[in-house]
Structure formats: C-alpha cells, structure tokens
Amino acid sequence: MTASILSKELKIPFYVILVDKIVTKYMGETSAKLRLIFDFISKNTGVYLFDEFDAIGAERTRDNEVGEMRRVLNAFLQFLEQDQSNSFIISATNNIELLDQALFRRFDDVLFYQLPGKDEVINLVKNKLANFKTGFDISSLPFDKFNGLSHAEISQACDDAIKETILNDKTKVTKALLLEMISNRKGVYFSDRS
C-alpha cells in the first residue's frame, strides 16, 4: 500500500516485481533477470516494489540457503549500489528476521508497520468504504473484532464486503457483513493459533 500511495502522490508509474517469477532453477539466470530489471529501472522512472523480498534477500549465512541464492542477493546488493536512477526501489517482507543485514545498509529508510490501533482502524474502514453507503456508524464498530489484523488484512476485508454487497445486488455495506468478512479473515490467519 505504501508503494502504491507513493506512486500516486509522485505521479509516476508503479511496478511490482514478482520475485517468484524471476527466481529460476538455472544457475545465473536469476541474476541475469535482475540485471534486466535494474536496466529497466534506470531507463523508466517509477516506484518499484520487490514484494515478499525474503525470497531473494535471505541472510547469506543461513545453513539452508543454496549458493545460487547467495549469488542472487550479492547481485541485487551490487545493482542497488550502482543504481543512479530517479526511481524508488522498495522491498517488503513479513519476515524481517530472515533478511540479510547488508540490505539495511543499502536502503535509505527502513519502515516498520505495527498493527493498527482503534483510530487507525476506524480511519482505514472509513476510507475504504467512502464511496459506498453504509447502514451504520463506522466509529461504532467493535474494535476487538479487528485485533491482530494488519492494515492490509482489514483493507482486504473491506474489499470483500464491497464485493459481496455488489454481487448480492444490495445498496449498502452492512455492519454484519463487514464483521463477517473480518471474522473470515481472522479465521484464515489465526485458525492454527487458536
């Protein structure tokens, strides 16, 4: 979400690099694909998001890391150092403990996102549902139902409620429907932790 907003605010294109699409089983091919991406970055100003970055940015000293992935990370670090573009290069992960420490020295800023508090949840839901009628006061939502969910998960639950409303030919997103979608999200993410 941060990368997308940066792109919109700066009025430059937004690109998502699908890490799973650049990693191959052939030696040297992944690094070659990375070179093509960084060549593109240098010629096309934009916001570039490497999502699920731990797939290539894992700590190089880990025992289970294969040599090829170490070379890929080394190549990525070199490409970052050599980058002279006007683009924004962003990497995101939910597994920060897996990342190689050298990455933290290569990026200008490191942002940590905490789970949203009550006011943030209310503002997020208000923003997500702003273009749709609701049959309830958003500030009356029971905050405890949102505990443990990230901004992205709450945002997705709002999108799910909007889709259900449209698909069922209804005119308003209801409180019950939104709470059902929140419950569904929690069920997916926390069912093995209960």
Image (cartoon, grey):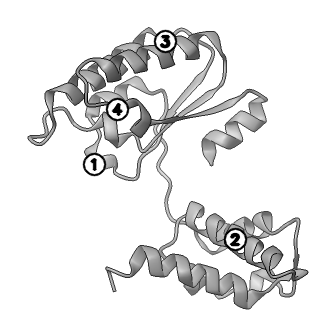
Looking at the rendered structure, the kind of residue marked 3 is Asp
CB atoms of marks 3 and 4 within 8 Å: no
Q: Would residue 21 appear left or right of 59 to someone viewing this image?
A: right
The one nearer the camera, 112 or 80, is 80
Decide: is 16 above or below 160: above
Q: Are marks 2 and 3 in contact (CB under 8 Å)?
A: no
Residue mark closest to the camera, 2 vs 4:
4
Quadrant where the C terminus lies? bottom left
Of badges 3 and 4, the one in the foreground is: 4
Residue occupied by mark 4: 23
The image quadrant that residue 160 belongs to is bottom right
Q: Is residue 66 above or below residue 187?
A: above
Kindly check if marks 4 and 1 are in contact, taking CB atoms under 8 A apart as contact: no
Q: Which residue is mark 1?
A: 97
Rendered image: mark on residue 158 = 2
- Badge 1 crowding class, 10 Å Cα cut-off, few under 14, some 14 to 19, many 20 or more, is few
- What's the residue at 34%, 42% (across, down)? 54
Amino acid at dot 1? Glu
Report how far apart the C-alphas of labels 2 and 3 lie in the structure: 38 Å
Three-letter amino acid code of the residue under disc 2 = Cys
N-terminal of the pair, mark 1 or mark 3, is: 3
Q: Are there few (<14), some (14-19), or many (20+) residues within 10 Å of tag 4?
A: some
Front-lying residue, 83 or 172:
172
Mark 4 and mark 1 lie on one chain; the one further toward the N terminus is 4
131 left or right, relative to 152? right
Identity, as a three-letter code, of the amino acid under mark 4: Val
Q: Quadrant of residue 15?
A: top right
Q: Earlier in the sequence, mark 2 or mark 1?
A: 1
On residue 83, the disc is 3
Disc 4/disc 1 C-alpha distance (Å): 21 Å
Is 121 located above or below residue 35 in the figure?
Answer: below
Q: Give whichever of discs 2 and 4 has the lower sequence position.
A: 4
